[in-house]
Image (cartoon, rainbow, N blue to C red):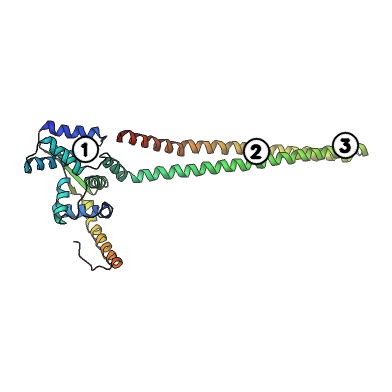
Amino acid sequence: MTGPHVNYIKAYLKSKGFTDLELMDDLTDHLATEIEFSMDSEKLDFETSFERAKQKLLPDSPYQLERDLKILTTPKHNIMIKKIAYIGGYLSAMCLMLALLLGSLTYHEKINSNLSRELAQSQNELSMILEDEVDRTANYISYMKEMEMSQIAVIQNLAAVQALIVAAIALFSITYLPYRFYNSYQRSQLELNSL
Amino acid sequence: MYSRELLKGILKPIILKLLADNGKMYGYEIVQHVKASSEGKILIKEGSLYPSLHALTKEGYLQTESVNVGNRIRKYYSLTEKGKTVVSPAIQEVIDFQSTLALLFGKSKTALS
């Protein structure tokens, strides 16, 4: 087999999307050995022998070989990436749910606080009518304390909700999103190569 | 000729056994050797052979030696020290599997090795 013949086989493999040089060397030798056998035993020319070797040895989509090789040689890596992506996605969803739960509890707290204020106001008005100064002052102090506690709880809860939302977005964008985008990118690359 | 699905699981033990018996071999030689030894019943497709050979090399069970043959590179595969240690367990596993299949399908046992 001449140098141009070997280059012709290599160019064919390249045109089919092969990029793994080690695999290309193996397939070039495999095809070349089969072609040599046909040329020697059946006295066929290179072109005819090459066509026959292609049909006999290579699958309908030759690039499938490199794809299979990638799947076989990178499973552990892929499994680890998948695990990280799914755990990240799960934690992100959990943070978001906790944020929603805490947010709704805070909203509930706020409604309670409004009701307490209304109650305190009506008690205050009643004390004014009855002209009970001691009761009025005690009610006012109790109301102020309650309002202060309630405001502190709302502020703390809102800070926690904010932190949980940030954590959810960060986890989602660091782990799950890159995995989804990379997967789609790989699929589109494979589709392009198989065209 | 057996289906690709059936051969998938035993391809690695076949490669390991062949290389243990013959020292070093190249891809085309492996295909022809298996075809001749199995009286044409086992035809290893290139689409299965090279991914398996490369995976075994990457896992450290095989090593390659490149030789220039007629304007091209021919790669000879041989067992590494690590590869030699897994030949017997791999063959034993296939023989055990063969016996289990015999239990399931009621055929008499036949020795693989």
Q: Are marks 1 and 3 in contact (CB under 8 Å)?
A: no
Q: Residue at x 38, y 34 (%)?
A: A185
Residue A70 placement (x, y as % from top left): 30, 42
Residue A125: image tag: 3
For the image shown, how many numbered marks are present on the structure?
3
Mark 2 vs mark 1: tell me if same chain: yes
How far apart are the two marked residues, 2 and 3, measured between alpha carbons?
32 Å
Specify the subunit that label 2 lies on. Answer: A
Task: Give the alpha-carbon distance from disc 2 to disc 1, as whole Å.
Answer: 63 Å
Comes first in the chain, label 2 or label 1: 1
**Residue that label 2 marks:** A156
Q: Secondary structure at mark 3?
A: helix
N-terminal of the pair, mark 1 or mark 3, is 1
The answer to which image quadrant residue A3 occupies is top left
Residue furthest out toward the top: A4
For label 3, the crowd category at 10 Å Cα-Cα, with few meaning under 14, some 14 to 19 and many 20 or more, is few
Measuring from the top left, give residue A174's x and y in whole percent. Answer: 46, 36
Which of discs 2 and 1 lies nearer the camera? The answer is 1
Q: Secondary structure at mark 2?
A: helix
Q: Is residue A106 left or right of residue B104?
A: right
| Residue occupied by mark 1 | A24
The vertical placement of B92 against A65, above or below, is below
Label 3 is found on which chain of the structure? A
